[in-house]
Image: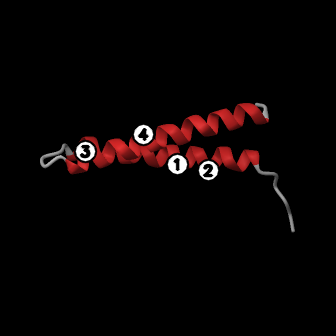
Amino acid sequence: MTTEDLKNKLTRLKEEHQGLDAAIAVMRATPRHDQLALQRLKKKKLKLKDEILRTQAKLLPDIIA
């Protein structure tokens, strides 16, 4: 995977993460929201965050000081 591919993937993941964040906020604002659905969104958001961190690690060179 090229650097450009990784950057595109990172951008897509960040956008999806922000979308989930917004969806979670809307759901929390709803008086009688579905707890199970909320937990699923939170779990998906956490998985995306992990994928974002892995992708960022691939973009940064591993420097040993």
Q: Are marks 1 and 3 in contact (CB under 8 Å)?
A: no
Q: Earlier in the sequence, mark 4 or mark 2?
A: 4
- Residue identified by numbered label 1: 49
Q: In the image, residue 55 lies at what x, y percent?
A: 66, 43
> In screen coordinates, is 36 left or right of 43?
left
Where disc 4 sits, the SS reads: helix
Q: Residue at x 46, y 44 (%)?
A: 18
Quarter that holds the C terminus: bottom right
Circle 3 is placed at which residue position?
27
| Residue type at the position of mark 4 | Gly
Could you classify mark 3 by the number of other residues whose Cα lies within 10 Å: few (under 14), some (14-19), or many (20 or more)? some
Q: Earlier in the sequence, mark 4 or mark 3?
A: 4
Spatial CA distance of label 4 from label 2 is 17 Å
Toward the viewer: 9 or 29? Answer: 29
Image marks 3 and 2: residues in contact by CB distance under 8 Å: no
Residues at discs 1 and 2 in contact (Cβ within 8 Å): yes
Residues at discs 4 and 1 in contact (Cβ within 8 Å): no
Q: How far from the left and from the top, in percent, is residue 42?
A: 37, 48
Upstream in sequence: badge 4 or badge 1: 4
Q: Residue furthest left?
A: 32
Q: Is residue 5 left or right of residue 39?
A: right
Secondary structure of the residue carrying tag 3 is helix
Q: Which residue is mark 2?
A: 53
CA gap, disc 4 and disc 1 = 12 Å
- How far, Cα to Cα, is label 3 from label 2? 26 Å
Q: x, y percentage for residue 35?
A: 21, 47
The label nearer to you, 1 versus 3, is 3
Q: Which residue is mark 4?
A: 19
Amino acid at the residue labelled 2: Leu
Q: Earlier in the sequence, mark 1 or mark 3?
A: 3
Distance of mark 1 from mark 2, alpha carbons? 6 Å
